[in-house]
Amino acid sequence: MICGMSRTAVAGSLFLAVLALALGCAGAPRAPWIEVGEGATRFGWDPNWSRLSNTLEPGNTHGGVVVDARGRIYVNSDSKRAVLVLEKDGGIVDAWGEELAGGLHGMCLAPGGEELWLVHTGRHELLRATLEGTILFRRGWPEESGKYENAGQFNPTGVTVGPDGDVYVADGYGLGFVHQFRADGTWLRCWGGRGAEPGKFNTPHGITLDQRHSPPRLLVADRENHRLQSFTLDGELIEVVEGMLRRPCGVAIRGDVVAVPDLAGRVTLLDRNNQLLAQLGDQPDAAKRANNGVPRADWLDGQFVAPHGLAWGANGDLYVLDWVSQGRVTRLARMR
């Protein structure tokens, strides 16, 4: 629900907003796509896709992106519309999470694809919810780990689920640990903590399950150490990936390709061996990189500002969330 409105009222207002946009733009020329990437990693930057700024002001887009089995795109914001739901064409079909405003910071699909796992920095919580926004489960700070003096030190930023249903949480804005929980919230272990040496973290901001290998691994975006780190499912370090990343915020994998939203103005693609494939939408103006305050008038098609989260569509498209105060989500259409 949006700001106390019923779902019927929400659906009606969103429909009217989209209809008004369609009528207002009838016959208007559509902006041309801009090609980014090269070779097998070419994408078309679609400037006509996102309707966020025209139908429903999203607020600060700060968190993650998820695409469900129907192709709907779920986007975090810091507003009372903490989760915005978009169709493949960019139109908004739902928005929920008023009680989660100001701190919902990442999410992933639960096994089965009909629920979400989410993390909240302000509430210091791990949550599970339906795709329609009903909260099913909450789990507070891991006091039993012995790493924290109080809940305020636990500020999780990323979450993923392992093949057996265990949930892994990256405490990016807290003390820098990765925690492993059972699906019922039982705490199992943690590893990492603050530091620059391999196996330690300086803002472990995003995390995902890496199924390119057998057994699967965990891939962590160690943002302020400018690297990714790969671990076994019980926290043993496997690999450090560095040298081509500025401030990696997250990780998303499709097939053998890793996509990394880099807060300092670009999206990086890596191959199965974590070697560089391409860097997309690189922001040439260093003053705009990782700058939440860049106004909409200064956004340029083909250039990111502060990529904070992204997700793959089933067809190979990428949906990228920029950390900007007015809210920005971009579709990169895979070109074949």
Image (tube, grey):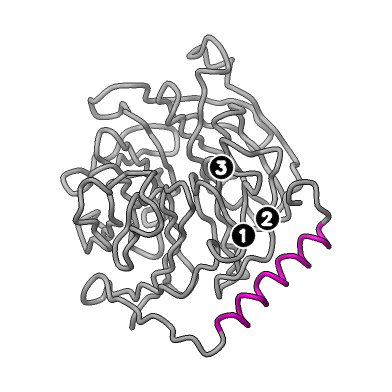
The segment highlighted magenta reads 7-25
Residue 234: numbered disc:
none
Q: What is the tally of numbered marks visible in this picture?
A: 3
Circles 2, 1 touching at the beta carbon (< 8 Å): yes
Disc 1: which residue: 56
- Residue 140: x and y, percent? 64, 25
Q: Secondary structure at mark 3?
A: loop
Residue 95: numbered disc:
2
* Chief secondary structure of the magenta portion: helix
Image height of 77 relative to 254, above or below: above
Residue under the image location 40 percent in, 45 percent down: 217
- Residue 328: x and y, percent? 46, 57
Residue under the image location 56 percent in, 87 percent down: 26
Image height of 111 relative to 120, above or below: below
For label 2, count other residues whose C-alpha is less than 10 Å away and answer few (under 14), some (14-19) or many (20+).
many
Determine if residue 216 is in view: no
Q: Please, what is the three-letter code of the amino acid marked with disc 2?
A: Ala
Which sits earlier in the primary sequence, circle 2 or circle 1?
1
Which sits earlier in the primary sequence, circle 1 or circle 3?
1
Residue 78: numbered disc:
3
